[in-house]
Amino acid sequence: MSKPLAASAGNVAGAPTGPSPAVMGTYARQDIVFARGDGAWLETEAGVRYLDFGAGIAVNTLGHAHPRLIAALTEQAGKLWHTSNLYRVAGQEKLAERLVAATFADRVFFCNSGAEACEGAIKAARRHHFANGHPERWRIVTCTGAFHGRTLTTLAAAGNPKYLEGFGPEAPGFDHVPFGDLEAARAAVGPETAAIMLEPVQGEGGVHVGAAEYLQGLRALCDEAGILLVLDEVQTGIGRSGKLFSHERAGVTPDIMAVAKGLGGGFPVGAVLTTEACAMTAGTHGSTFGGNPLAMAVGDAVLDIVLEPGFLENVEQKSQQMRQGLARLQELYPNLVEEVRGQGLLLGIKLKVEPPHVVKAALAERLLVVGAGDNVVRLLPPLNVAEHEISEGLERLERALAAVDQSQT
Ligand SMILES: *Cc1c(COP(=O)(O)O)cnc(C)c1O
């Protein structure tokens, strides 16, 4: 028996008519469908163009349809898609070696998403102590306001009650302390602690930047206690912070790091990076799709560009341009904008109104921005956004704020 088609099901390419109920309603989506993109721009089927300062939530590192990423993906697609991890994968070895060369890490495990990278990082931290004769060290100190993904364990790690509700008993083993509070972290470390895990900048939580002294203090604390520092750089990594990884800004290195979002420039990929002390031996972890040749080819091409001389300096310059523009908007609309904060091209404006008002008003100006916790709207343009596109984005945001300001009075 055939079911009647939902009203919108045959109309995906046409004017938006509301989301199809066939897609599980786990997101409160904007009623808009994009058909194509180029650089920092997205376009509907009807040709209406939007400036993308969301970059798929810090994923489209190099914007949309970058010719070098298309070339890397299509070249690999013509050769080999998948073999499984039962065999050596050339692209994995190449990308892992490049990540090792560019970071603190000695080993890389590839997976497919940020949550998986965080799960892998948690497993690696626990296994390290197990292998060193301390199986009792399995608890992890994490921060309130954190976001580590939507698997049951990463939800427990972050401890956001809103996301945990209705999913059964919370996975045990996480001790939550306030982000930024070194003494609270120190007090939470005990004989069962394996690691401290946090984002150097809390992205989803509202663009809270961990101070350099805080991260340095945590590093020293971990060394004293003989535990591991695990950084979740899923959002901050791959140039988003203005450095390849945000921890470089604080002059500290983690023992384990989760990476995903920007690494594939829009192709799903995640990675767990560890030092050689890591005890993840054959059989301890795995993934069917992780390190798939397609993902590896694209990740390699992303690194080619992000590691080009001058690229990250350029991100820092764009960041300055954005910050100056945003500071001006704060002066113009002190009743709407409370603070501008962030790192590199992971910037947030803390609002005195509900973020959805500004997200909607920006959408009406054909500018895409992303909400976050703590009343923040995030600005996450592609890292290769042009100067004139930033100016354009700031103008659109100014008009959006003006509209919100109008509607308030
Ligand atoms: C997005 C994000 C995740 C989860 O990534 P998914 O790919 O959605 O699983 C984890 N940690 C941080 C810091 C993130 O921003």
Image: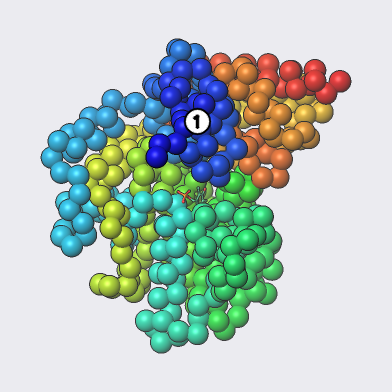
Rendering coords of residue 95 (x, y %): 26, 49
Q: In the image, is residue 148 above or below residue 356?
A: below
Residue that appears at 57% across and 18% down: 366
Kindly identify the amino acid type of the residue bearing the numbered disc 1: Ala
**53 vs 344: above or below:** above
Whole-percent x and y of residue 333? 77, 24
Residue of label 1: 6
The kind of secondary structure element at disc 1 is: loop
The quarter of the picture where the C terminus appears is: top right
Q: Is residue 373 left or right of residue 407?
A: left
Residue at 41 percent of width and 87 percent of height = 133
In the image, taking residue 356 as reference, residue 82 lies left or right, namely: left
Is the image coloured rainbow, by chain, by secondary structure, or in one colour?
Answer: rainbow
Q: Residue at x 63, y 48 (%)?
A: 205
* Figure quadrant of the N terminus: top left
In this orientation, does residue 328 appear? no
